Image (cartoon, rainbow, N blue to C red):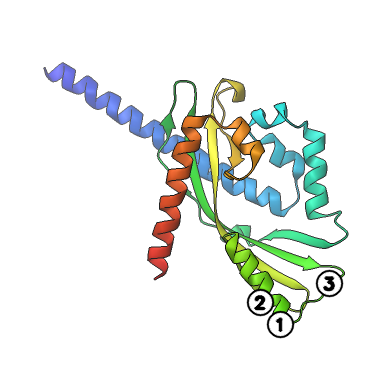
Amino acid sequence: MKKILFVFLIFSFATLWSQKSDQSIIKEDTSQFMTKFQNKDYDGILDMTHPAIFEKFDKETLKGLFQKMLEDNEEFQMEIIDTDKLTFEVSEVMKTKDTKYAFVTHPMKMKMTFKNQKFDDSQKEMMVNMMEVQGMKTKFLNENSLEMSKQSMMIAMNDASTKNQWKYLNYDETNPLYVSVVPVEIMKKAKSYYADFLIKNKENAN
């Protein structure tokens, strides 16, 4: 009986240690991921992205989309800011038959500068309201620049296709690309987890 109890305790400790180790790796990875976004290190971002994405788009196409959004846009310039001030919360590590996964929540802040447009007070109010519907808090810095912030979530996945390394996807259930590559079981868990996360944030803000 004592031997069985000892084996159970060792197994429980090993499982707990593995959880903590995975969570530490995921937290460090997602911090690096956001820093790469701020530094416009597109190759680094794609190296950390789950390979299921590349079955839909090749890396060069995605790299071009990032560049167009963050650099080569004639209408506006967008940048991720204050990544050194972000805090990351990692869920417990869960499993499906084939995949280990976890959720990482964090705030995200962006600065957007319009190159050919200036906003008067009524237009600013309309833009703030429009962004709020998208879940973003927005404030104008001047007549053509604004800051946007939101509570975001990433999904960490570890499976055969990643060679048992952690790779990442941004949670966005409105994005058909996300829906097409994330397993249904994980999507359901992600939706529930993110909703609970937003509710807790709202309660803590009141």
**2 vs 3, front mark:** 2
Marks 1 and 2, Cα distance to the nearest angstrom?
A: 6 Å
Q: Residue at x 63, y 50 (%)?
A: 34
Looking at the picture, does residue 22 appear above or below residue 84?
A: above
* Helix, strand or loop at mark 2: helix
Location of residue 4 with respect to 120 vertically, above or below: above
Disc sitting over residue 117 in the figure: 3
Q: Nearer the viewer, residue 2 or 181?
A: 181
Q: Which of the two discs, 2 and 3, labels the residue nearer the N terminus? A: 3
Mark-to-mark CA distance, 3 and 1: 13 Å
Q: Which mark is residue 125?
A: 2
Q: Left or right? Give the position of 10 relative to 80.
A: left
Q: Are marks 1 and 2 in contact (CB under 8 Å)?
A: yes
Q: Position of residue 195 (x, y in %)?
A: 44, 51
Residue 141 visible (yes or no) = no
Pick the front one: 29 or 133 = 133
Q: Secondary structure at mark 3?
A: loop
Tell me the kind of residue under disc 1. Answer: Asp
Q: Which residue is mark 1?
A: 121
Whether residue 174 is visible here, answered yes or no, is yes
Q: Amino acid at mark 3?
A: Gln
For the C terminus, the quadrant is: bottom left
**Whole-percent x and y of residue 110?**
67, 61
Secondary element at tag 1: helix
Residue 48 pos. (x, y %): 65, 36
Query: The disc labelled 2 sits on which kind of residue?
Result: Glu
Residue positioned 70% across, 71% down in the render: 146
Residue 151 at x, y percent in the picture:
53, 57
